[in-house]
Amino acid sequence: MKVFKVCEEKQIPVTSHCGGVRTHPSKDVIKVDYLDSSFKLKSKTIHLKNSRKSGNDFSKYFIRPEHWERVLQKYPNLKINIAHLGDNNEWRNYRKGDTNGTVERTFQLIKNQKHVFADLSYFFYTKANVKAIYRELKSDLELQSKIMYGSDFYMCQIEKGEMNEYYEYIVDTFQKKMNLYDQVFIKNAIDFLS
């Protein structure tokens, strides 16, 4: 946890993977340090079932946005970017009305914490997801100032193949509201990094 103290003191922004279950450890048993409810540093061993195959247990313990809440209570000026803002499946669920999934929980963390941002990398390769985030950002000024573009192009190409049509669609969609385009594609990244 000392790393977060240093990052907060030196104003070094942190980016954390969040969303999807493809991230996984190389072992099924790992020792972790964490803050308990009274902010005491504790250690425990976690046995991850089938983590190297599906990543589900790893996701449960390590890449959910709510895991940052306790860290942010202790280090309230720590700047964090919640990378990906969910994956394609999580966005599909969100578009169908899931109000307790990764996307909604990330939105809530962003709204509740002054220095939390998110980026649009990876999930941004489907038109349905582009439309959904554009609708959210158009109507929510708080999210507009904290969501930034991220590419993850190589992952998108693995999922989708040729991406030119989607890049053009993203630009065309966001340029409908030029100030939103500038905010998401330029200004928010500068704010996060400064």
Image: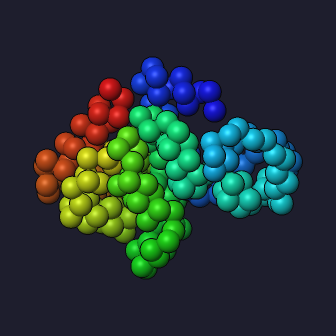
Farthest front residue?
38
Left/right placement of residue 77 relative to residue 70 reads left
Residue 117 visible at all: no
Q: x and y percent of residue 124 in the render?
A: 41, 56
Q: Nearer the viewer, residue 104 or 172?
A: 104
Residue 46 visible at all: yes
Left/right placement of residue 138 relative to residue 48 reads left
* Picture residue at 19% right of the left edge, 50% below the top: 180
Left/right placement of residue 74 relative to residue 46 reads left
Q: x and y percent of residue 19 in the render?
A: 55, 56
Q: x and y percent of residue 181 in the render?
A: 20, 48
Q: Quadrant of residue 130?
A: bottom left
Identify whether 50 is placed above or below 120: below
Farthest bottom residue?
96
Left/right placement of residue 3 relative to residue 111 reads right
| Number of numbered markers | 0
* Picture residue at 63% right of the left edge, 50% below the top: 37
Q: x and y percent of residue 151 in the render?
A: 42, 43
User: Quadrant of the image for the N terminus?
Assistant: top right
* Picture residue at 38% right of the left edge, 40% below the top: 115
Q: How is the image coloured?
A: rainbow
Q: Nearer the viewer, residue 50 or 39?
A: 39
User: Quadrant of the image for the C terminus?
Assistant: top left
* Picture residue at 53% right of the left edge, 39% below the top: 74
Q: Nearer the viewer, residue 182 or 81?
A: 81
Identify whether 190 is placed above or below 65: above
